[in-house]
Each structure stands twice: as C-alpha cells, then as structure tokens.
Image (cartoon, rainbow, N blue to C red):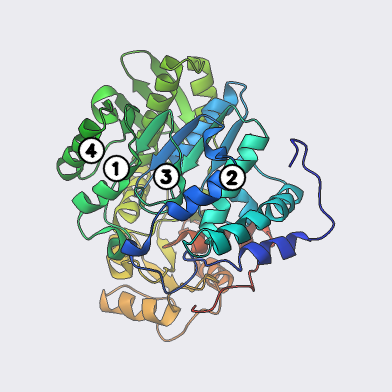
Amino acid sequence: MGQNFSTPNSLSYSEAVDLCLSLADFERNTHSPKHSDFHLERMIFLAQLLGDPQNAVPSVHVAGTKGKGSTCAMVASIIDASGKNVGLATSPHLHSLTERIRFRMNPIPKNDFITLVSDLWPFIEQTSTEGKYGGVTWFEFMVTAAFHYYAVKQADMQVIETGLGGRLDATNILCPLISVITSISLDHTKILGDTVELIAGEKSGIIKRDIPVIVAPQPYGEEVYPVISEVAKEKSSSVLDVKSAYEVIAEPNDIKTQNIVITGDIDEYSFRLPLMGPHQAENAATAIAVSETLNDLGFEISSSNIKSGLESVHWPARLEVLQDNGPILMVDGAHNTHSASSVVQAINDMRRRDILKIDRVILIFGVLSGHDSVGVLQQFESLASLTVPVRSRHPRSSPSGLIRDQAQKLGMSLVKPNGEMESVGDGVELALSIAGANDLVLGTGSISVAAEVIEWKQNIDPEIYSNIPAGI
C-alpha cells in the first residue's frame, strides 16, 4: 500500500465495515472470553507478517481506567500544534469507525479505511489459518490497521490508547518512548480483577524495560502507586508522579472552558482548556508531563506548542455542552462510579461559582451490561431532580425498564414511572419537553448514550452495524 491511498473498486465503505465486523467483536458481544483466554501471540504473528508496523513510528502508550482518551487527545493535539504529523488511535468511537484511526487529529477518510480493509484482509486470513492462535478479533484488526496506517503515512509520532487493561491488550506489542498510566479505579472487574491493586497490575503491564513511566494523579493512590512502582523497579524504568511534580490550579471560566495554571520544575503554563472538570485539569498536567518528557528525548515541543495544543483540543462527549440556553443540554460518557462522581463534582462546582445557573437537572440515563448501573445511578441521585431511563442501540445496552426499576428502588423521581423509552432520541425529546428554561438536561451513563444524544441534536447519521457475530 503506497503512501497516497487510492480506493479499490471491489469494496464500498459499508461493505468494508461489514467485513471487518464479521470478526469476533468483544466490545459489542454480550459474551466475552475469560481474561485467561487473552494473549498477544496472535497480534505478534500478524504484526510480523506486516513487517512490525507498530515499531515504525515513535509511540506514546496510554493505559488507565479513566482519562486515557482525553489524555491521548491532549498529547496528540500538542504534538499536532508543534507542526508534526501525529497519529491518534483510540476507542470506542462515537459515530464512525474511522474515528478510531485519526491522522493529524482528523478521522481517516473512508476511502483510506476501505484500502486498509482490502490490503490487510489477506494477512487477517493468513493469521487465522496459519498462526495456530485462532481468528483475529475486530479490535485486533483495528489496532493493526492503525499501526499500519501510521507507518505508511510516515507519521512523526503515534499516540496509542489501550482498549482494555494493558498487559494483554492488543496494543501492547509496541515499545513506546513513554508509557502513561492515567487514573485507575474499579471497572471491568470481572475481567481485570475486583480490587484496584489487581487492576493496577494489569494496567502496569504496558511498562517496558528502561522506558520512562508517567503516572497521572490517582484517586486510590495508596493502593495504586506501590503496584506501579514495583513493576517499574523490576523493569528499571523511571517514574514521574504528576501529582507530586506539578501544581494544578483550575477555575471554570464559563460552562465550556476553564482557566488553568500548571506549574512544574521546567515552566509554568497558563491556558484556557475547552474541557470541563478538575479531572480534565489533571489530565492536562499529565499531557504536559508527557510533552516535557518527549522534549527531553529530543522530540522538540515548545511551551507555546503545549499552550496552543491544550487550548485547541477537541474531545467530544466529555461534559460537552450541546445547547447552552433554554434549557442547557450536556452529555458525558461516564460509565463507572468514579467517572460519574467526577461529573457530579464538576457540575456542583460550576453551580457554586454561579457559572452554571440552573434550577433542576433532568438525567437521561442508560448503561451497558457488565457495568455497575446501581453504583453509577447512586452518584447522580443527589444531582438529578428527574430521571429518564433510556436504552441505546449498542447490543450490550441494558433495558430501560431495568434502569427504571433500579432508579425507583433508589428513590429517584422518574419522568415516566411506568413507561419505557424506545430510543435515546425519544428520551431527549421527552426531557427537553418538560425542562424549563433554567434546567440542565444531562445525557450520561455510557459513551453510546452520549453519542446518540449528540446525533439527535446535531442531525448526525450514525453507522448502523448489521453484521454482528453470533452469540450476542
């Protein structure tokens, strides 16, 4: 595949999407393998067939429970502001598969995705038949496609987010310039372990020998730091603790931006971040730590690049305001108790400062199975005056009736105590129809709910995936 991509005639975009989604898809499948069944041998075999593209471009590798996507976006935006060609590979996507493979901060063109599927497919089949490790999964394909794309495009840097865990994640075949571990809390406990120490051990699996490690501020620092430190010591890798190394001062400017001052040993950075909440200020400090470390490694990034990159970063569905008056409409992809708590904290902080002047919060809420829906609902209990349970299109989405029953047991007031919503869009229409001019309508509980609220508001045609493997 040449550096300039051309569209093959054999596949349409929808056919390319259906073809890659014919692979096992554990993100959307209701039945996932045990963690002991995960391994990297298949990814290693596939990558070797392609000439190990993951090693062709310098990397920043990011794992964590929360904040890893936002941190990746900030780091990539800073690198982009420095004038370099940066690849950004993240998951999940909101509206299109192409969002998972970004180049120079933009989703790749659909024609390029068609070419990736066409050119990689023979290697996918060869791996499945000759590799002796079973069939390639959809996530493995998308990760491989990102590595290959950035190698062909001769990117200057790639910022790679893990999918699940770290140690056995498909992205963990690369050897980065820097390993980054963002906030760790309880999530995916059936797969990664039911304590933060066990989860920290899995996330620490991305640490490579003699490669510096940057650790974001941790809500469970006493449990997490010793685990990371021990793994780093075994690997002879230095550790930079962002919480100790940087002073962070953040104050909301309005409901869309916050003024931040971050001070470290090297410089002081003052900027306006278009992402809300104290947790995003901590993510910005982590991104600065990554940028300064890259600079130390000879990858030139100036203080002005850092400021410009952070002020221009765009990462939707994170306390994103879709409508700023009469009533306010906001979305966030919070899906565990820690992220929900961060959302509540951010909203209450804006209310205390009179930046967010609202009478009520009307909650549009839906979750995916496997997540602690009751625990997340409890975080929003004190915030929400009324709740609208919804079910997104995602195959693993919990029925809205189940959420309704859970909310009722918690004593939460429902807009329709005995009814169910047919779609997220219906839930948005209902919530806005009863909301007053001074109310906040908040869509949350999963990234899929946030995405569908955005689609409803912005008239975005989503990709509808019909080719889902059996077992869902």
Tell me which amino acid carries mark 3.
Asn
Which residue is disc 3 drawn over? 172
Please report whichever mark, 3 or 4, sits nearer to the chain's N-terminal start. Answer: 3
Indicate the amino acid at tag 1. Answer: Ser
Q: CA distance from mark 3 to mark 4?
A: 15 Å
Q: Secondary structure at mark 2?
A: helix
Q: Position of residue 378 (x, y in %)?
A: 27, 65
Q: Counting other residues with Cα less than 10 Å from the Cα at mark 3, is it few (<14), some (14-19), or many (20 or more)?
A: many
Q: Check the image and report above or below for 273 versus 137.
A: above
Rounded to the nearest angstrom, the CA distance separating label 3 from label 1 is 11 Å
Assign a secondary structure to mark 3.
Answer: helix
Q: Residue drawn 54% across and 66% down?
A: 432
Observer-side mark, 3 or 1, equals: 3
Which label sits on residue 231? 4
Q: Residues within 10 Å of mark 4 (few under 14, many from 20)?
A: some
Residue toward you, 200 or 8: 8
Image quadrant where one finds the N terminus: top right
* Residue 423 image point, x, y percent: 56, 75
SS type, badge 4: helix
Image height of 344 relative to 463, above or below: above
CB-based contact (under 8 Å), mark 1 and mark 2: no
**In this figure, which residue is indicated by the disc labeled 1?**
204
Spatial CA span between label 4 and label 1: 7 Å
Pointer 2: what residue? 146
Which numbered disc, 1 or 2, marks the residue that appears first in the sequence?
2
Residue at the right extreme of this rendering: 9
**Figure quadrant of residue 376:** bottom left
N-terminal-most mark, 2 or 4: 2
Q: What amino acid type is highlighted by mark number 2?
A: Ala
Q: Can I make out residue 246 in this image?
A: yes
